[in-house]
Amino acid sequence: MVTRRDDDPWAIGAFARSLTSHSEHTVSAYASDVRGFAEWAGRLGVDRPGQVQRIHLRRYVSHLNTRKLARRSIARKAAALRRYFRWATRTGVVATDPTLGLQARGGDGRLPRVLERGDLEVLLEGPSPDGEPRWRRCRDDAVLELLYGSGLRVSELCGLDVDSVRLDTATVIVWGKGAKERRVPMSPPAVAAVSAWLRMRDDVVAEGPAMFGNERGRRLAPRDVRRVLDRRSPTPTHPHALRHSFATHLLDGGADLRAVQELLGHTDVATTQRYTHVSRERLRSAYREAHPRA
């Protein structure tokens, strides 16, 4: 049983603390989604999760559609509510789960964004900004080479410890979604960049096992990685675009879909298959641009 305070009848804080296998970003998004529903429901006089009925949830999904949110965003909010009410039922916050049968169409048809080769070259090999300290250049090189060369999620990269990296075998051990461990190969440029970073890491990371640290000597956070992209990328982009590029370039080069699935740590091969659509679309685009009869 979860003890609820009168000022927190939805126990959202307790729900968020239960999401131990998710990244900080995912936990924050789920909590925000549930809080958004609670505020909307409150305007209908529904002040506690035990008062929620299936009709309220369906009306909420309809309300989101009228706001013209992307289908992917609506699907995520619905998933957050299903997760919340499963937890609430399990812990006794509510007697029955009102989300049973709740559906929202996922996806909006957009393919993952893949960086162009020229943008990647500037990002990975471009000159340092004026006055940039040597340690930051070395750290950022290692961060970017692991994101692109090994296809790591940002949360996986930030969670790396020094003993997660095996330079002698050119592999990195990461903990992915669902606390699943996998070994991922490192590219030769990644090995070189990580080696250079490790030679000065102790001057930056004051204590603890964290592989990467920020300017304050604390473990690197996702927002720090986004700042790296802001400094280095010639075009606005997101760290996850490097993972998309990793998968697509492997498939472009003829890699087996199942092998790419394993490298990415996807539980379902259907998640990996979207990159085959990206690869095919790139081929079609190249054909249209280059063939005189296209």
Image (cartoon, rainbow, N blue to C red):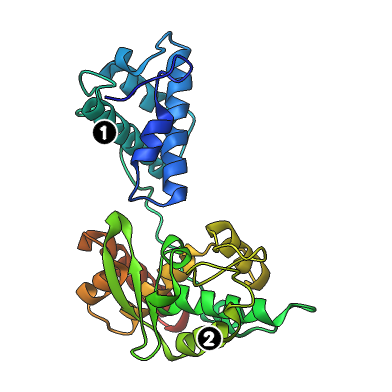
Judged from this view, the residue extending furthest toward the top is 45
Residue 101 placement (x, y as % from top left): 20, 29
Q: Earlier in the sequence, mark 1 or mark 2?
A: 1
Q: Nearer the viewer, residue 266 or 13?
A: 13
Position of residue 281 in the picture relative to residue 117 (left or right): left
Measuring from the top left, give residue 178's x and y in whole percent.
28, 55
The percent coordinates of residue 246 (x first, y second) are 40, 75
Query: Are circles 1 and 2 on residues that touch, CB within 8 Å?
Result: no
Q: Is residue 99 above or below residue 69?
A: above
Quadrant containing the C terminus in the rendered view:
bottom left
Q: How many marks?
A: 2
Q: Which mark is residue 193?
A: 2
Q: Nearer the viewer, mark 1 or mark 2?
A: 2
- The residue shown at (22%, 29%) is 90
The reply to whether residue 231 is in sight is: yes
Q: Is residue 169 above or below residue 114?
A: below
The residue shown at (47%, 49%) is 25
Secondary structure at badge 1 equals loop
Q: Which residue is more in the foreground, 19 or 82?
A: 19
Q: Is residue 65 visible?
A: no
Gap in angstroms between the C-alphas marked 1 and 2? 46 Å
Residue 89 lies in what quarter of the image?
A: top left
Q: Mark 2 is on which residue type?
A: Ala
Question: Which label was assigned to residue 142?
Answer: none
Vertical arrangement, residue 64 with respect to residue 198, above or below: above
Question: Three-letter amino acid code at disc 1?
Answer: Gln
Where's residue 155, x and y in %? 44, 60
Give the residue at the far front of this rendering.
207
- The quadrant of the rendering that contains the N terminus is top left
Which residue position holds label 1? Answer: 103
